[in-house]
Amino acid sequence: MMNFKPDSRPPGENTTQAPPAAPAAPAVQAENLTVVRGPRTVLRTLDFTVPRGQITGLLGPSGCGKSTLMRSIVGTQDKVTGTLDVLGRPAGHPALRTRIGYVTQAPSVYDDLTIRQNLDYFAAILDPGRAAADRRHENVTRAIADVDLTTHADALAGNLSGGQRNRVSLAVALLGTPELLVLDEPTVGLDPVLRRDLWNLFHDIAATRGATLLISSHVMDEAERCHRLLLMREGEILADATPEALRTRTGADTVESAFLRLVDAATEAARTKETPTKKTSAKETPTKETRTKTRTKETSR
């Protein structure tokens, strides 16, 4: 188990904890955020906020732009236009480097190093110098325990399972207690028990450390574990609301059903917009009288 008490509630019961009070200034604020890649517009004029100290879920099907949005927030995405402020500064500002933890879909670990050596390496980059050696050791030990890998600390990363490698990447992101954690599908490939334990850890981080978490997923049942949701489809945000507000708005029993109803509504609106009623001019469809006059004219010539 991880570094907190396991969930003892009955299976199927809503496991979302009450959201902590969010300060007025959001952790992330976007206005008219657009990303263009070649001829394709990947993100289309997005407006949204991510509250501080809460877990915001970024949900949508594969290819809808979730990873592009996350790269934009951490400052590694090219060709971004619009306004995107993160922790009070423009996205990508050098001062944000130690304030944000980022976990990509592909585990960012070195196979020829042990788990502890991987974390020691990244800790030295974040907090260099001999004077910080004790603090680095403490942070590394804590991060390894957070993701339940203490007994595997001396194992080579190359010998770990996919789920364990994902947890090493998460441990790296937890070094230095970041204010904002951006996690791109961190529970992919994990068994149900480990997924539950990770979500308990996410809630613990938000509640006890005051951190903000932005977590992407295409698994809709994970939406119920978030304080707030951003639902995406084809580079656009369909909804920015709490799970409860989303269900109420759509009259659905689950977030998945609510999402599908929003998708259907958006598809119908797009279809109506693309096929307006076409008005036919007299020139395009001549009347019988006009055709007769034209033939008479041509015969008289």
Image: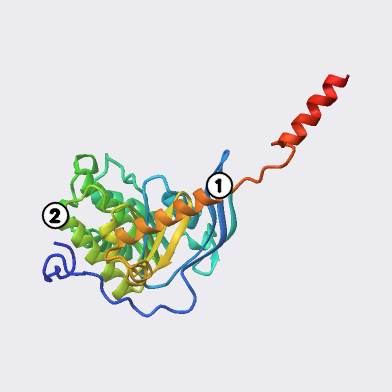
Nearest to the observer: residue 11 or residue 167: 11
Q: Amino acid at mark 2?
A: Thr
Residue 70 rendering spot, x and y as whole percentages: 44, 54
* Residue 129 shown left or right of residue 9 in the figure: right
Type of amino acid under label 1: Glu
The label shown at residue 274 is 1
Residue nearest the viewer, comparing 88 with 110: 88
Crowd tier of the residue under label 2, counting other residues whose Cα lies within 10 Å: few below 14, some 14–19, many 20 or above = few
At horizontal 14% and vertical 57% (from top left) the residue drawn is 193
Image location of residue 164, percent across then percent down: 21, 49
Q: Which one is nearer the viewer's eye here, 131 or 296?
A: 296
Asked if disc 1 and disc 2 are in contact, CB closer than 8 Å, the reply is no
User: What residue appears at the point 72 percent right and 37 percent down from the top-left corner?
Assistant: 287
* Residue 98 visible to the viewer: no
What kind of element bears circle 1?
Answer: helix
- State whether residue 36 is above or below residue 8: above
How packed mark 1 is, by other alpha carbons closer than 10 Å (few <14, some 14-19, many 20 or more), is: few
In the drawing, what numbered circle is on residue 13? none
Residue 261 position by quadrant = bottom left
**What is the x, y in percent for residue 79?**
58, 47
Q: Secondary structure at mark 2?
A: helix
Mark toward the start of the polypeptide (1 vs 2): 2
- Considering only vertical position in the picture, is 10 above or below 193? below
184 vs 31, left or right, is left
Q: Residue at x 32, y 73 (%)?
A: 209
Q: Mark 2 = which residue? A: 151
